[in-house]
Image (spheres, rainbow, N blue to C red):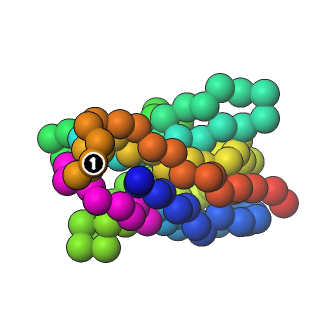
Amino acid sequence: QVQLVESGGGLVQPGESLRLSCAASGSIISTYFMGWYRQAPGNQRELVAAFTSDGSTSYADSVKGRFTVSRDNAKNTMYLQMNSLKPEDTAVYYCNALVKTRFKDLSTYWGQGTQVTVSS
């Protein structure tokens, strides 16, 4: 079983920064996709930033230039550095991964989510 555990959310003022972490555990053989989604009240869950299967990164237009996704393969951890935060970035942020494990073929997994609130 794969577990994704997010951390790093909180309450910040507009213009401030936060760094989210997503630690993956389990018998992962290959990672085909790993990314950050967010969902604000009343809105659909949207992709914010991700690593694609070839290792390249992609970002939603709304966060380009402000957010940076990175990962530490040795720690099986993905990060989301969020700078110049805006009130519209307020949402629950979820980590998502599409992986193959020793015991299960390609499957998608979600973390429990971490709340980010940007407010003055």
For label 1, count other residues whose C-alpha is less than 10 Å away and answer few (under 14), some (14-19) or many (20+).
few
- Comparing 80 with 105, the one in front is 105
* Residue 90 x %, y %: 71, 47
Who's the residue at 27% across and 56% down the image?
28
The amino acid pointed to by label 1 is Phe
Magenta-span inclusion, residue 116:
no
At mark 1, the secondary structure is loop
| Residue 117 drawn above or below residue 50 | below
10 left or right of 2 in image: right
- Where in the figure is residue 42, as x and y percent of width and height? 78, 27
Residue 57 appears left or right of 18: left
Identify which residue is drawn at 54% across, 51% down: 111
Instruction: Identify which residue, 58 or 38, lies in the foreground.
Output: 38
**Residue 27 magenta-highlighted:** yes
Q: In which quarter of the view is residue 25 placed? A: bottom left
Residue at the far left: name it: 54
Residue 57 horizontal/vertical position (percent): 28, 44
Q: Which residue is mark 1?
A: 103
Looking at the rendering, the stretch of residues picked out in magenta corresponds to 23-31
**Left or right of 45: which side holds 50?**
left
Main SS of the magenta part reads strand
Q: Is residue 71 visible?
A: no
